[in-house]
Amino acid sequence: MKLLGLDIGTTSICVDVIDSETGEVIATSNVPNSSFIHTAKPYEKIQDPARIVTVAEHAVEAMITKHSPIAAIGISGQMHGILYLNAEGNAVSPLYIWQDGRGDLEYKDGKSYAEYMSEQTGCNLATGFGAVTHFYNSNNSLVPEGTVRLSTIHDYVGMKLTGGKEPITHVSDAASLGLFNVEEGVFDVAAIEKLGLIPSFFPKATGGFDIIGKTKHGIPVAVAIGDNQASFMGSVREAESSILVNVGTGGQVSMMTDKPFNNQYIETRPYADGKYLLVGPALCGGRAYAILERLFRTIVILAEGEVNTMYPVMDKLSEGYRTLTNKLEVSTLF
């Protein structure tokens, strides 16, 4: 059988077709996620969910047309972010992504929104977590009228591919929103209510790889999982004895475990089959390369040149590093 994988990343949207027996990648496509919305608020990082859905649907349709029959579709995507849905399952807000900084703004008594929530609930929360974004929005009258549910972007894309009206969230994503009991696999209703939030806004969570519906072609679509868990699942052959270093827009160091473990540097994230991932997350990974590309592109434009992307040029230049007569030195500071 041929299976299709769709990943909704922060800066790109990728579709793969693989052979289910051998794991061979038959085809792949990668298109920029050009959905960022300009905002005057420096802490605000938002994207257009309608644009994301359009790009994702076109990419999936092209692969189905070229490589049919497809037996099933799996989805992963950027974790932590949220958008608001109405009763019809349509977005009524932008996507607030994991880079959104409103949770670090001051709330009361010198504490940020994220710090206050962590202190009140005992949960380890940070800005960018969906629950933190929602708490800020709730306290600043920013929750759109008609909202009945929160959703991740990849759950939303799954809904649009299958015609669903209500998101079903895998525990790997539910935990990334915050206010989630990792060991019990449910949202912490007491913590949610203590903060004055409405528990029913939070999506239903499942620990299994449920089929959420079928596309118009009749292809089953599985519940979306977090991109961190998907990268571990797809990259590691011996899960119990491996450590995965993954560099995307951010970066993670991940290993599988039977038991939860938390400190200020390590997160426990739900994985599969009752297992967990211990994750050391970094906010900046490939984003550093993106910042460098933007600098070069800006310089070219200021010099009255025309360029859409500098990545091919940067890649070509980097290939020649072995021929440098002077030693290459790297500093990972901005």
Image (tube, rainbow, N blue to C red):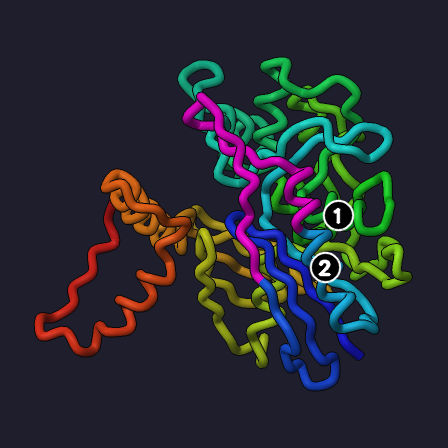
Residue ID for mark 1: 169
Kindly report the distance in space between the C-alpha atoms of the residues bearing marks 2 and 1: 21 Å
Residue closer to the observer: 16 or 223: 16
Q: Give residue 60's mark.
A: 2
* Disc nearest the viewer among 2 and 1: 2
Q: Give residue 119's mark.
A: none
Crowding near pointer 2: few (<14 within 10 Å), some, many (20+)?
many
Crowding near pointer 1: few (<14 within 10 Å), some, many (20+)?
many
Direction from residue 332 to residue 260 in the image, left or right: right
The question of residue 40 being in magenta is answered with yes
Q: Residue 51's image quarter?
A: top right
- Type of amino acid at the residue the image marks with label 2: Val
Q: What element carries label 2?
A: helix
Magenta stretch in the rendered image: 30-55
Q: Where is residue 274 in the image (x, y as percent from the top left)?
A: 71, 63
Q: Residue 28's image quarter?
A: bottom right
Confirm whether residue 281 shows in the render.
no
Residue sitting at 9 percent across and 75 percent down?
A: 325
- Type of amino acid at the residue the image marks with label 1: Thr
**Quadrant showing the N terminus:** bottom right
Q: Position of residue 93 (x, y in %)?
A: 67, 28
Residue closer to the observer: 322 or 271: 322
